Image (cartoon, coloured by chain):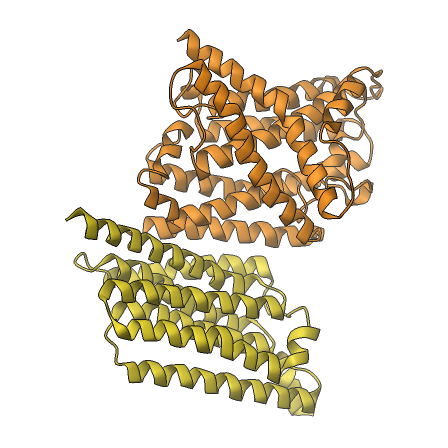
Amino acid sequence: MTNRILFNVIQILVVMAFAPLVKGILNRLKENIQSKRGPSIFQPYRDIWKLFHKDEVIPEQSSWIFRATPYMVFVTPIFVALLIPVLTGYPLFFAFMGDMLGGGFILALGGFFATLAAVDTGNPYGPMGASRTRMVGFLAEPVFMIVFFTVSFVAGSTIPYIVHKHWVTPLANFFEPSHVLLMLAFVMLIIAEGGRIPVDNPSGHFELAMIDESKGLEYSGRGAALMKWGGSMKFFVLLCIFLNVLVTPWGLAQGEGIGEVLLAIPLVLVKIFIFILILAVIESSFAKLRLFRITEFLGAAFVTSVAAMITRLLEI
Amino acid sequence: MTEPNMTLSVLTKLDALAGGLFLLTALGLVAMRQVLASLNLFVLQSILLASSAFILGYQHASVHLYAVAAITLTTKSALIPWLLRRTIRQEIYARREISQVLNIPTSLLLSAALMILAYFIASPLLTLGQELFVKVNLPIGLAALLLGAYVVMVRREAVPQVIAILSMENGAFFAGVAIAPDLPLIAELAAAFDVLIIALVMGLLTRRIHERVGTTAVGRMASLKEE
């Protein structure tokens, strides 16, 4: 029992420690693909460190929501990390506290507070970005739902630890059409939710074109650091859900020993690195979509997930 | 005894995978805005059809299906795209956006409805005794057929309509290889050449229209007639 609590804590520490690294590697890879040298992969750590040592400025008109939001954004991915398999293939102490839908709701709570805080500031760019994020969010929601329902229908459970075993026992399950379609739909979701390129440009500095970034424009000092860190942790958690639950449980620790759990850290990071490589190629080969084309993108994701559902429901 | 069962299960999954991707390409034809992208998707779809025919041919040990796979590969994924690129070159490369009667999100939702419809139509035909391949191929082929018909209806331009008709034909074949694995070879050959000729004729006709009218937006043909 104590072991399992310890492993849960290790999972959280891994998420906290390596989330900025994933962002850094992704940025570096994108610059390399454009044949530039790019910033160091540890740049996000330096940014966060620097921001923690700066003074914080808070708008006079803002209420407590503005001050509470960075903590919400920072804490929600940590809660989700308790529920999902980050390192171990078997359920840990908190695993049965919530299922995948619960995890989705917790992540959505962070997004909800970020939206409120953006409206709270009175800065015109904040609400604009917030409303755009909501637009992407509510279009992404049905896709989330259908992906999760299909997954839980296939595995007979919504607990991620039970679901992820199904895809590789036997291995032929991996090549099921519904599985392939689900993976595709979820990659599109990660792109939309993570604010990656066909939907949003994370490195753009033009306020009118921002979707995800403009919500945090008013934050400075510690608040900005927490928002940044929380954002990269959310991305990391999404990648973990995708790679460890929906794709495969490969590389996760199966035994109870602490050595195995520690060994799982580099294996999971390698898995994430491979996916990030693919993501960097996707990001570099597409242009950002115009705002009203995002509905098409997410519509395609929705239809893909529906196709996954009906090929599963009405066959074999 | 386990050995043949194992191969059968792997073959079923592979066929199902080809089917899932086939469905995805059919949806892609609905969602694509560019002519060139539609053509590439059509090539991919034909390759998937050929691979499904190949898997079924292996399962039934049928030479006919191997022949179907070979014919599909040569005509649909090589010859027809080459022909289309040759005859209507500037239409494929110069025109990037295709105009549609309905916008793409609506089209995608309608196509989801069409897919469900296809499964409903196919479900009474799938009795329990049938093998798994039919259960995979028949509804997906039917769905591709319906989606192709939908694209023909919605697109306003000649070249995407040609591609959609060809993809309808792909859907019919995808269902056909599973229902009738022992179709005589002569029928397959006839169908394959038929499609080739159709593509050629339509390509030439489109070029002719383009020369006369200066556009291939057939949606505006009605008003041209009146003047």
The orange-tinted chain is: A
Depicted B36 relative to depicted B227: above or below? above
Can residue A37 be seen? yes
Residue drawn at 65 percent across, 80 percent down: B89
Q: Is residue A234 left or right of residue A164?
A: right
Residue drawn at 67 percent across, 53 percent down: A285
Task: From the viewer's side, name the closer residue of B110 and A32.
Answer: A32
Image coordinates of residue A153 in percent, x first then y, are 35, 39
Residue drawn at 24 percent across, 54 percent down: B8
Q: Residue furthest top?
A: A2
Task: From the viewer's side, name the closer residue of A5 and B1.
Answer: B1
Q: Residue furthest left?
A: B1
Q: Quadrant of residue B15?
A: bottom left
Can residue A239 be seen? no
Task: From the viewer's side, name the closer residue of A217 and B198.
Answer: B198
Image coordinates of residue A275 in percent, x first then y, are 56, 40
The yellow-tinted chain is: B
Residue drawn at 44 percent across, 48 percent down: A180
